[in-house]
Every structure is written in C-alpha cells, then in structure tokens.
Amino acid sequence: MTQKIITVVNQKGGVGKTTTAINVAAQLAGPKTKVLLVDLDPQGNATSGLGVPKDQAATTTYNVLRGDSQLADSVSETSVAQLYVLPANANLAGAEVELVNRANREYALQTALKSATYDYIIIDCPPSLGLLTINGLTAAQLVLIPVQAEYYALEGLSQLLSTIQAVKRSTNSGLELLGIVLTMFDKRNSLSEQVEKEVRNYFGETLFKTIIPRNVRLAEAPSYGKTIFEHDRWSKGARAYKALASEIRSRLKG
C-alpha cells in the first residue's frame, strides 16, 4: 500500500487529540501494517500514553527535527505489535525556538520522514498553531480533527481551517481534510446532541459517523501507558475507536 501520513490536530487542548492519535494508530497497526506515531507535542503525552518513558529516551523528535539523529535510530517499540513511536519530551519546546531562524523551517519534519518505511504515519500535534503544528501539516497528506462535544466546539475551528488552507497555499498543496471526529460525547447530556447536530449541519459528510463517547476506561488508559484496546478492549471507548479506524480505512480506499 501507499504510505499515508495523517496529522491529528486541534489548537484547543483537552479535546481528545492525543487519545485519538494513540488509539487510531494502535487500531491501524496489524500483522502486515506497520505504523509510526510521531509525538510532536512537548508534553509527550502520546509517548507516555504508549508506555514509553519520555524522559529516558536517548533521542527524540527534538533531535530528529534538529538533524542530530536519524529517524530510524530514534523510534521506540511499543507494547502493540507493529506500532512504533518517535518519542517527545519537554526538550521539544526548544525546537520551535531554534527552527525559527532556519531556512525551510516548515519542512524539517517532512525531511526527517522521507526515509520512513511505514504504512501509516500518525502525527500528534501540540495544542497550538505554532511552528511545530505547521511542520506537522506540511509533512502530512491528510488532517484528522477531533472536536469535543461541548458548547464552544466550533470556536477556533475556523482559525484552524484557515491555517490548513494557508499551508495548502504555501508549503503543502496536496494537503486534504480526512475528516472531523466528535469526541467526549455524553448521550445523557442534551447539549452533546445539540453540538452533534450543529457540527453535522456545518460539516456534513466531513464529520465521521463514529462518535467517541465520554468513557471512564478511555480516560484511565493513558495513566497505565496502554491503549484502550490493551486496557479494556470491550469498553465503549475501544469499540468506538475500532469503528473510527474502520471508517478511516474506508475513506482512504475511496
């Protein structure tokens, strides 16, 4: 199959972005499908969420972006077969500052990924629209946007979509929107249903049919360094992310 690079992005924090990146990556990985999750967030939550000690990694995304290390020498195995992570920690915050004065700074990640031999590369961006996120968008073919089912769900989305269009015009003309996924949905709350209706009216078929529920087991999993499928494969959260990964595969084939 042709390699697919998907950036998971939303400049708002706490919308389930990293949870989505981790569990979609885990579900896409399989016997014949090799997946790399690139942690592009200085918080390193995708790294620790996969059970990799972020402060013990010899080389990280920071070193790869700087050109100090090769991608192949920097990735770590995870407990999920065929799923690898390029780890990140607080050092990555320095890369944003260091890249500012570098020529072609928006292409640092794209350049680093040229040697990658994975079927899927999932990029977990920081909750901002800074240079790291621009690198994530420039390196990708597709964008996946998690949106929390809450009152201000659409706030900031226009800015994010404008940023995506700006990247298309300047550094990555082939960038496309894979879709928007509604997260942290509480069916007991009428507000969640109102938000779903509003988002679906606004984005139509761009919104995935699968909705990620607010789920205790899903919230617990990162603290154990596990995907939801390892933590509780029968939970509502696990079933939802399995369905989302299936929808993603269908869209990519279509």
Image (cartoon, rainbow, N blue to C red):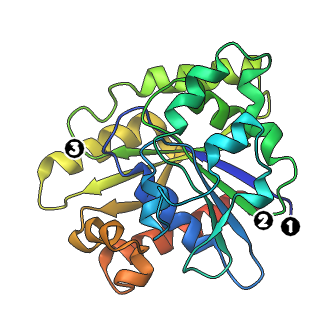
Say if 83 sits above or below 179 in the image.
Answer: below
Q: Which residue is mark 3?
A: 194
Residue 156 appears in view: yes
- The one nearer the camera, 20 or 75, is 75
Position of the C terminus, as image quadrant, is bottom right
Give the total number of marks visible in the rendering.
3
The spot of residue 119 in percent (x, y) is: 78, 65
Give the quadrant of residue 75.
bottom right
Residue lying at 53% horizontally and 26% vertically, measured from the top left: 161
Residue 140 visible: no
For the residues labelled 2 and 1, the Cα–Cα distance comes to: 7 Å
| Eye-nearest disc, 2 or 1 | 2
Please state which amino acid type lies under the numbered disc 1: Met
User: Could you tell me if the residues under marks 3 and 1 are in contact, i.e. CB atoms within 8 Å?
Assistant: no
Q: Secondary structure at mark 1?
A: loop
**Which amino acid, mark 2?**
Asp
Rendered view: 199 above or below 59 = above
Asked if the residue at tag 1 contacts the one at tag 2, i.e. Cβ–Cβ closer than 8 Å, the answer is yes
- Write down the residue under mark 1: 1
Mark 3 or mark 2: name the one nearer the start of the chain. 2
